[in-house]
Amino acid sequence: MLGDSAGHLYSCNSEGECKDHGEQGKWIYAMAVYGGKLWLSNFDPGGPFAGHLHFCNAKGVCKDHGKKGNEITAMAVYERRLWLGDTRGHLFACDAEGECPDYGEKAHWIDAMAVYDGKLWLSDTWSRLFSCDAFGVCKEKHRGEGEWIDAMAVYGGKLWLGDRAGHLFSCNAEGVCKDHEKKGDRIYAMAV
């Protein structure tokens, strides 16, 4: 599945042929699979879909669960819950029914999340890196010198980060990060 900035959801086959399942709000920004469903968020600054959370079945039929925060910019599955981060830096933990208690402000605008070394890791627009436990208690682990951290992935026993300046970083569980230099333009996404 993929989502676009117009809010359309697509399912694609291995030949690259895609079916448009229609508009599911505006600007699909984050997605995660949780509880056998695809969950997605809308990024619609000041608009009617800002902060809305949807879940979709395999046929692309989606249900809007309403506003869960500001614009939801990051999602990860951790400790049997779907975790959300928004542009206010708030952290939410959702159950399979879409009930999402707010754990409060943990950072500035949360832009990326990953599960690494038994913790939920998140980054913010001030180049800070946090590790959080299943109770939503977060500790700052690293304060970067660079740009916003937009992308995060786990690979080879390390947490990898990509920033808006195009730098790639690898970090250990203590939050010690090595800059692997500029790899290109702004790094928006990573996957393993």
Image (cartoon, rainbow, N blue to C red):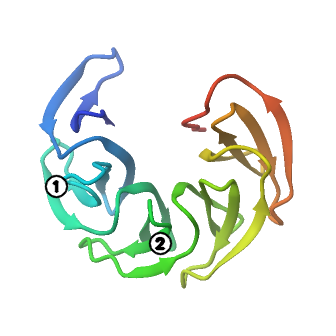
| Structural crowding at the residue carrying mark 2, measured as other residues with C-alpha within 10 Å and reported as few (<14), some (14–19) or many (≥20) | many
Q: Nearer the viewer, residue 93 or 146?
A: 146
Residue 163 image point, x, y percent: 66, 40
| Structural crowding at the residue carrying mark 1, measured as other residues with C-alpha within 10 Å and reported as few (<14), some (14–19) or many (≥20) | few
Residue 76 image point, x, y percent: 48, 59
Residue 72 is left or right of residue 166, and the answer is left
Give the residue displayed 68% in from the left and 43% down from the top: 147
Q: Is residue 157 above or below residue 35?
A: above
Q: Nearer the viewer, residue 83 or 47?
A: 47
The residue under label 1 is 48
Give the residue displayed 22% in from the left and 43% down from the top: 26
> Which quadrant of the rendered structure holds the C terminus?
top right
Q: How many marks?
A: 2
Residue 154 is left or right of residue 20, and the answer is right
> Which quadrant of the rendered structure holds the N terminus?
top left
Q: Specify the amino acid type for callout 1.
A: Pro
Residue 161 is left or right of residue 110, and the answer is right
Which disc, if any, is residue 91?
2
Q: Secondary structure at mark 2?
A: strand
Q: Is residue 192 above or below residue 145?
A: above
Give the residue displayed 34% in from the left and 63% down from the top: 70
Instruction: Determine the image quadrant of residue 150.
Output: top right
Say whether disc 2 or disc 1 marks the residue closer to the N-terminus. 1
Question: Going by the picture, which residue comes out furthest to the front?
Answer: 46
Q: Secondary structure at mark 1?
A: loop
Q: Nearer the viewer, residue 41 or 191?
A: 41
Q: Nearer the viewer, mark 2 or mark 1?
A: 1
Residue 164 image point, x, y percent: 63, 37
Q: Is residue 153 above or below residue 165?
A: below
Q: Specify the amino acid type for callout 2.
A: Leu
Give the residue displayed 44% in from the left and 59% down from the top: 87
